[in-house]
Structure formats: C-alpha cells, structure tokens
Image: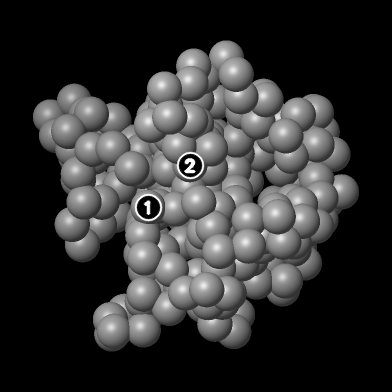
Amino acid sequence: MRVLVIGDTHAPCMDVRYIKFLSDLHDQWNINRIVHIGDLVDNAAISYHPKSPSLRDSEREFSLAMDQVQMLYRLFPTKVDWLVGNHDALTERNMADCGLPRSALMDYTELWEIPKWVAHPRFTDLEIDGVIYRHGDKGKGGAMPAYSNAQSEFCSVVQGHYHAVGGVMYGANNKARYFGGQTGCGINISAAAFDYGKKFSKRPVLGAMVVIDGNPFFEPMCI
C-alpha cells in the first residue's frame, strides 16, 4: 500500500495551508490509502482543561470545526481510516461522566458528515503492511514516542498525538528492522486553543507521513 498519514488537525484549529500540502503529497506519491492519525477535531469547549471565555462557545466551535472537516472531506471523499483520538473522543468521555452509554452518541462519521470515512474507536491499532498505526495516546512517551512504542511492540509504529515531534527513527534486533514514525501535525499554533503551549520552547512540527509498502518517509511542511 501507498499510505498517506494525516497528522493531528484539531479542527477548527487546522492550518489552512495543510490542505494544499496534503493534496500535493497525495499526487506526488500516488497514494492509494489514507489514514488520519487522530484528533481530527479539537473540542476545546468541552475539554477538561482550563479555558478562556473565548473557547467556551461549543456551538460556534462545532460550526467552525465542521467547515474544516468538510474541507478535508472534499479533498478525500473516499475511504479514510480515522483513528479517533483523545480530543475527538471528548464527546463520549463527557457522556460517560454523565452516566450515559456510548450507544446514545451519534456515530462519529455521521456527526461530522463524512459518511465514506471509517472511524476506528479510540486506542485502536490499525495494521497495514506489518506497520501499526495508532493515535499515540497510549503506550510510551519520551523524545521519540513512536520509536519507544515500536521497541515495546517489536514492530514498526506510526503515530501522532505529540505535536512537537516529527520524523523517523530506526532500530533492529536479531530478527528484524523496525521503525518509529511520528507524523507531526497540521495545526495553527496561533489558535487560542494552543495558548497552553506558549510557555514551552518546543513548537509543533508541521508535516505528514508517507509509508510505501511499509517503508516510511516524513514530509515536513514548508513554513
């Protein structure tokens, strides 16, 4: 398979240049499968973190997020494997806190009007050509989380979740070579939802992954 891996987009906080970047990668690499690594949307208004008053309007955020999700859907209107991330899952996490069952929540693809995409439940490990794809909010962290998780799984892992990391790191044992691939992300760092990051020296690495027959390539986005 020729897989394009879309990094965290956190709609409505996606960098609008990310759309053209993904489109160019799709054409350049002759892609035939697409994975969204998770955190398609941000859901700042219903998050568990302290937030400024400007982030508490859930209806406005949903409308703006829908606009960006539909931009992605127009670009990729066929099957996309979407690995539901921790921000995507805030709806069901809040419902669970209220004692409501998951069955009471609208299907994610119906909620975001992306009927041809496939939403995989949070913490899913999707395997393609012997490579595990996951959002990244389980397993190990560290300087290169995907590589740490590849060592734990004894096979290659591609993941997102950590916005400030992008690239590929290899390892090997007596039986196989493996890699950890961090997708980077496609977020607009100036969005109010990311104000928490201003105190850190690290900044998001904008980019995406391409994996050709199990071989990884990190593509940074020019800024």
Vertical relation: 173 (above or below) 140: above
Could you tell me which secondary element the residue under label 2 belongs to? Answer: helix
The answer to which image quadrant residue 136 occupies is top left
**Residue at 45%, 37% in the rendered image:** 94
Q: Are marks 2 and 1 in contact (CB under 8 Å)?
A: yes
Could you tell me which secondary element the residue under label 1 belongs to? Answer: loop
Q: Amino acid at mark 1?
A: Tyr
- Which residue is under mark 1? 48
**Residue at 72%, 34% in the rendered image:** 111
Q: Please identify the quadrant where the C terminus is shown.
A: bottom right
> 18 or 11: nearer the eye?
11
The crowding category of the residue bearing disc 1, from other C-alpha atoms within 10 Å (few below 14, some 14 to 19, many at least 20), is few
Residue 50 in the image, given as x and y percentages of width and height: 36, 65
Vertical relation: 199 (above or below) 18: below
- Which residue is under mark 2? 90
Residue 46 in the image, given as x and y percentages of width and height: 50, 51
> 157 or 74: nearer the eye?
74
Q: Is residue 22 left or right of residue 122?
A: right
Residue 137 in the image, given as x and y percentages of width and height: 33, 43
The answer to which image quadrant residue 68 occupies is bottom right
**Residue at 84%, 39% in the rendered image:** 77
Between the residue at mark 2 and the residue at mark 1, the CA separation in whole angstroms equals: 9 Å
Mark sitting earlier along the chain (2/1): 1
Q: Please identify the quadrant where the N terminus is shown.
A: top right
Residue 139 in the image, given as x and y percentages of width and height: 23, 38
Q: Please name the colour scheme applied to the rendered image.
A: one colour
Q: Residue furthest left?
A: 174
Q: Is residue 52 left or right of residue 49?
A: right
Q: Amino acid at mark 2?
A: Leu
